[in-house]
Image: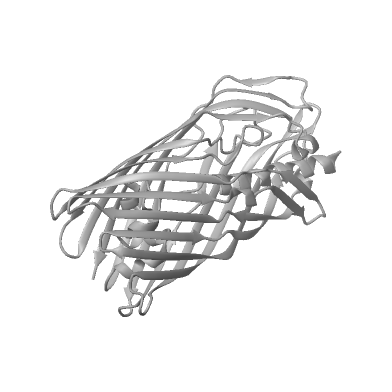
Amino acid sequence: MKKIVTLAAISGVFCATNVMAAGFNLREQSVAALGNAFAGATAGAEDISYSYWNPAGLTRHKGTQVNLGATWVAPRSKAKVATANIPTSTQNPHITAKTGDIVDHGLLPTGYMSYQIDDHFTTAIAVNSPFGMTTKYEGFWAGRTHGTTSKVQTVTVTPTVAYKVHGHENLSLGAGLQIQYIKAKLSNSVPAGLNVEDSASLEGDTTDVGYTLGALYEFNPSTRVGVGYRSQIKHKLKGQIDFNGPLAAQAQTISARLTTPAILSAGIYHDINDRWAVMGEVSQTYWSSFDELRIKGRKGLLSVTEENWKDTTFYGVGVNYRVNDQWKLRAGVAFDQGAVGDEYRTPRIPEADRKWYSLGAEYRYNENLTINAGYTYIRANDGRVGLRGDHYGDVKGNRGSLYATYSNDVHIGGIGLNYAF
């Protein structure tokens, strides 16, 4: 019995680790693009921060440039009602009428630096945090066996090179490496017998490498299209799981394989005239690479948990209006699909389909310094958790069922500086 309970604890904690990392993509990697809801991010190349989606666009920027951004992400997520049945508890059902806000706000910094080698080659390096989120539930809430605290952080360093093709100057190509560090801290309640529970906590991290590719074609000075690809990164987290009560002797080192998804994007940018520009974007995120989770402990424990995430599509359209030589205004709207259905959505990250509404402004202080500001409001559909308790990990771990409905939205604001030497 103790072995089964320990296996369940490990499965439950690490399951949430991967849901958090794969299920919340931080798209906010450029303050300028934020003002257009990231429409045209793959083709715009308006400053070097757009190289996150398409490194080929770096050939449009001369000399040496530095771009620094800071974006404040303020999500809100509250459970309206949560009901759970835990098989090892005689106090069924457990009902939480309402939770407080379960997500933390956070500052997302970005940094880019580019150097033009000659008329054809440009190199750059970027530092980003492409995945991450923190959630925390208060007290003895109904879904505690599925998650209480979750914190996932990533840092990615990306050296890139862009090449304007000799003899075909309208075409630029780009490539780079994604060197990604990921760290997870999670906890949840664990059934340890009839009406007995323990608290399990886990920490793990790893660093692994992927790549990024891009192409930009300029039909003329006013119109361009771009394609960008960020590869999946196969991680193997290593860490430690600990227990605070009767299962303390089962603490051990563990490992789990995690694949962050590949992202394929395509965009278009067009200057209508000297004042107006329009842009569009479509991207596919391949969450389906996260179909199951395998966990192994130093003491020989092994767990397989079904996840069944699905590929998602993002659509965006935007517009720019140049007021004068110094000021430019931006706007955009977008639709972003959720990655998981009710049957597999967990309380760690109760995300759902969402709509983006964005505004931005650019101020050109002088020939060298440009300042961007952006704001986005994201309105998400209700996130419904419908865990019946019959999934492999839920049965083995006695986690039981959980039904909950969440209201979700996000406010995002950022400021960015681009300086050309």
Residue 18 visible in the snapshot: yes
Q: Nearer the viewer, residue 147 or 116?
A: 116
The residue sitting at 63% across, 60% down in the picture is 234
Toward which corner of the image does residue 182 lie, by quadrant?
bottom right
Which residue is at 23% across, 54% downward?
371
| 368 relative to 72 in the view: left or right | left
From the viewer's side, name the closer residue of 369 and 164.
164
Please determine whether, in this image, residue 259 is positioned above or below residue 10: below
Number of marks in the image? 0
From the viewer's perspective, tell me whether residue 72 is left or right of residue 297.
left
In the rendered image, which quarter contains the C terminus?
A: bottom left
User: Quadrant of residue 403 in the image?
Assistant: top right
- Which color scheme is applied? one colour
Farthest residue to the left: give it: 324
In percent of width and height, residue 210 lies at 56, 65
Q: On screen, 193 above or below 285?
A: above
Tell me the quarter of the picture where residue 333 sits: top left
Measured as percent of width and height from the top left, residue 328 is found at: 20, 50
Query: Residue 169 vs residue 207: left or right?
Result: left
Q: Position of residue 201 (x, y in %)?
A: 66, 44
Q: Position of residue 81 (x, y in %)?
A: 58, 21
In-front residue for pair 120/91:
120
State which quarter of the image contains the N terminus. top right
Q: Is residue 46 something that shows in the picture?
A: no
